[in-house]
Image (spheres, coloured by chain):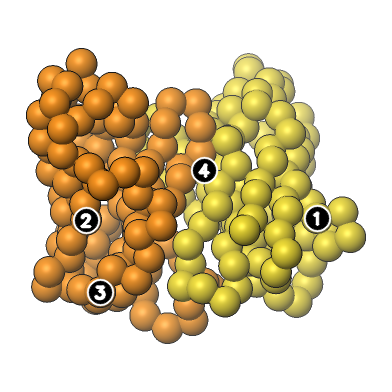
Amino acid sequence: GAGVSQSPRYKVAKRGQDVALRCDPISGHVSLFWYQQALGQGPEFLTYFQNEAQLDKSGLPSDRFFAERPEGSVSTLKIQRTQKEDSAVYLCASSSPGQGAKNIQYFGAGTRLSVL
Amino acid sequence: AQSVTQLDSQVPVFEEAPVELRCNYSSSVSVYLFWYVQYPNQGLQLLLKYLSGSTLVKGINGFEAEFNKSQTSFHLRKPSVHISDTAEYFCAVSDTTNAGKSTFGDGTTLTVKP
């Protein structure tokens, strides 16, 4: 597709379950970002990849959160032993190579995670 | 580290009226500045960005913003709004030295009434 695709769009999990959220970036985009958006707040940075390398994971809230991008394209954000406070929309964004922070980030529609 | 404050959580206006959504930021380094729009159940869409040069930046859908370095502000304006402009608007900054990690404000809900 032409845009960033995220799946599933909605996920309901029982507390303690593991979940995996998928992001398909725009073809050819080198950089990939994950953000967490809690209800009524702006997105907060979680982690950043350049190709398959995870260059910044300073925003991951705990060691229950893990992200990977093994082939430098699709990325998966995994949350182990989900807690109620993990309920949020998880946004993925990708950007084209070069120009660093000048790049436009293209966002997916997000995955809304509800932990019961 | 950077921070962004959007001064109004909700802004109601009538159709065809002008609107200003306010954004102030704090940073110890040079930053790039962005405004995004988010419609319900959708991702963020870039409205405009300031990288350098002219402090008045024009974006899509008739929006513009002015960068004021002395006041560390980047307010968004539109001279005449439409019903379709009803959405959530986010101001964001990113460090010019990194790869684009952005810090967002908490958003302003713009509601345009007929």
Camera sees residue A23: no
What residue is disc 2 on? Answer: A67
Chain that bears disc 3:
A
Secondary structure under the numbered disc 4 in the rendered image: strand
The chain holding disc 4 is B
Q: Which chain is yellow?
A: B
Q: Chain of mark 2?
A: A
Residue B11, compared with residue A4, is above or below; it is above
- Callout 4 amino acid: Val
What is the quadrant of the C terminus of chain B in the image? top right
Q: Position of residue B111 (x, y in %)?
A: 60, 23
Tell me the kind of residue under disc 1.
Answer: Thr
Residue drawn where x is 79% and y is 52% of the image: B73
Which residue is under mark 4? B37
Q: x%, y% of residue A81?
A: 16, 32
Q: Amino acid at mark 2?
A: Ala
> Which image quadrant: the N terminus of chain B?
bottom right
Which residue, given by chain and number where applicable, does mark 1 sit on? Answer: B72
Q: Any idea which chain is the orange one in this picture?
A: A
Considering the numbered disc 3 on the image, is that residue within a helix, a strand or a loop?
strand
Determine the CA span between mark 4 and mark 1. 21 Å
